[in-house]
Image: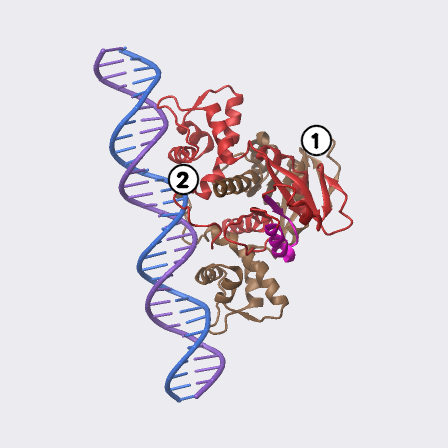
Chain colours: A brown, B red, C purple, D blue
Amino acid sequence: MSETGKYKTKDRVPEPTLKRLPGYLYYLEQVKEEGTINISAPTIGKDLGCDPTQVVKDLAVTGVKGKPRVGYNTYELIHALEDFLGFNRINEAFLVGAGNLGAALMAYQEHQSLGLRILAAFDVDSKKIGQTIGGIHILEYNKLFSLYDRLNVKIGILTTPNHVAQDVAEDLVNCGIKAIWNFTSAKLSLPEEIIVQNTSMSSYAAVLLRRLNDAEK
Amino acid sequence: MSETGKYKTKDRVPEPTLKRLPGYLYYLEQVKEEGTINISAPTIGKDLGCDPTQVVKDLAVTGVKGKPRVGYNTYELIHALEDFLGFNRINEAFLVGAGNLGAALMAYQEHQSLGLRILAAFDVDSKKIGQTIGGIHILEYNKLFSLYDRLNVKIGILTTPNHVAQDVAEDLVNCGIKAIWNFTSAKLSLPEEIIVQNTSMSSYAAVLLRRLNDAEK
DNA sequence: AAACATTAAAGAAATAATTCTTTATTAAAA
DNA sequence: TTTTAATAAAGAATTATTTCTTTAATGTTT
């Protein structure tokens, strides 16, 4: 079926690998602080509690080569990881739905270190419109349509109630958004080429609670 | 990496399945609203845009049996899913680190529908101590140790800065916490039996930004 | 009442990801 | 300069997950 309309399966980096990369980045920044210039994959593996060959495979996606008996250059690796992940660029985003979770993400300053900049938030609630959270203005939802072609925003952050998620997502796509970070529980049906990253809190709660339940009985 | 103990692989539900279950639950609640009494796996698959046999396999973990030509009973399925996931119980939790993300999660009312109740939050910042966010009190961090044996809290939500995450996690474990929902980028080293659910925003940003980058070139 | 169409359920195959193994490189020491 | 120890890199095997296929059950229709 749809299973690989992904023409470029060949050079696509596996999702589990991508998810681990920020962990390496955070670790390497610590290591650099301590003045370490070179670091080997087995050392990283030991410190992070994971398999050294996996570390090698993961880091290989950045194209950085290590030297036997020496390891990787810390600074080079950090730079390559940031570059590969896009954390050292400015990735502009719109956020829709300034409710609890939306407001939270607006206030969450760590976005900056991910290269994410939320340019504006949108909501339909007149009580919220005009407010500013974390330096980000909340605009009337309809303003979305007038702003989109003046700007070059590719990322939409979706924190609306579930029942409007699909409609809002379609609006975002019509506004030229290429990627949607979906925090709702709704399963979005969008054109193939739109990148959707689902980050539903309930999914993680589900895994956590179930594992806890497994352990207790 | 040993994210989870491996002894009971036999009857352990795969993580991808667990993550999909809340999606079914949300969908079924909608379907029930519309008055549908019975629903078939192929119908669910069509609506949710996923493989019908996968739907069958996923729902099988709840033990609910469907009838050929009829499908599953909507109400029965919803109840079984809530029960299986623990969403209809009250799962008490402590939160440590009432910064941006922590405050966000405290304000996030949807926790209730996941059966999560944050009893109290802890922080070392004297400016925050005494405040209330979303009805949850922020207490002095040290109070954690005096509270733990009077209560039966099994879940710890970790939203501290990265560099104290490991120490706080160890404190939580010493206080009898069995499961940690880790929102930091730190890789936690804890006893095997502790359940750790990593939900690092940067991991999801990494996947999103990289896929966007792949698509653009 | 019997045949039929539909679908759940179980099992098999394929795919993706991780772990393990081997090989080859290279800097340091003798 | 040669040997050695350590490690990166590439490839193989294992494991887990998803997709595909088959079988059996059941309500509906004729």
Residue A30 percent across, percent down from the top left: 61, 63
Q: What SS does tag 2 mark?
A: helix
**Residue most extreme to the front:** B150
Task: Give B20 or B9, whichever is nearer the viewer.
Answer: B9
Closer to the chain start, of discs 2 and 1, is 2
Is A164 drawn above or below residue D8 in the view shown?
Answer: above
- Total marks in image: 2
Q: Are marks 2 and 1 in contact (CB under 8 Å)?
A: no
Residue B156 covered by magenta stretch: yes
Structural crowding at the residue carrying mark 1, measured as other residues with C-alpha within 10 Å and reported as few (<14), some (14–19) or many (≥20): some
Amino acid at the residue labelled 2: Ser
Amino acid at the residue labelled 1: Asp
Task: Give A111 or B32, whichever is nearer the viewer.
Answer: B32
Point 65% across, 39% down: residue: B118
Task: Give A174 or B62, whichever is nearer the viewer.
Answer: B62
Q: Are marks 2 and 1 on the same chain?
A: yes
Tag 2 subunit: A
Q: Is residue D3 left or right of residue A69?
A: left
Point 59% across, 30% down: residue: A164
| Residue wearing tag 2 | A2
Residue A38 covered by magenta stretch: no
Structural crowding at the residue carrying mark 2, measured as other residues with C-alpha within 10 Å and reported as few (<14), some (14–19) or many (≥20): few
Residue B108 percent across, percent down from the top left: 65, 38
Q: What SS does tag 1 mark?
A: loop
| Residue wearing tag 1 | A125
Residue B203 percent across, percent down from the top left: 55, 51
Is B189 drawn above or below residue A217 in the view shown?
Answer: below
Is A36 drawn above or below residue A118 in the view shown?
Answer: below
Residue A184 percent across, percent down from the top left: 57, 36
Tag 1 subunit: A
Instruction: Write the start and end of the magenta stretch as one range.
Output: B155-174
Q: Nearer the viewer, mark 2 or mark 1?
A: 1
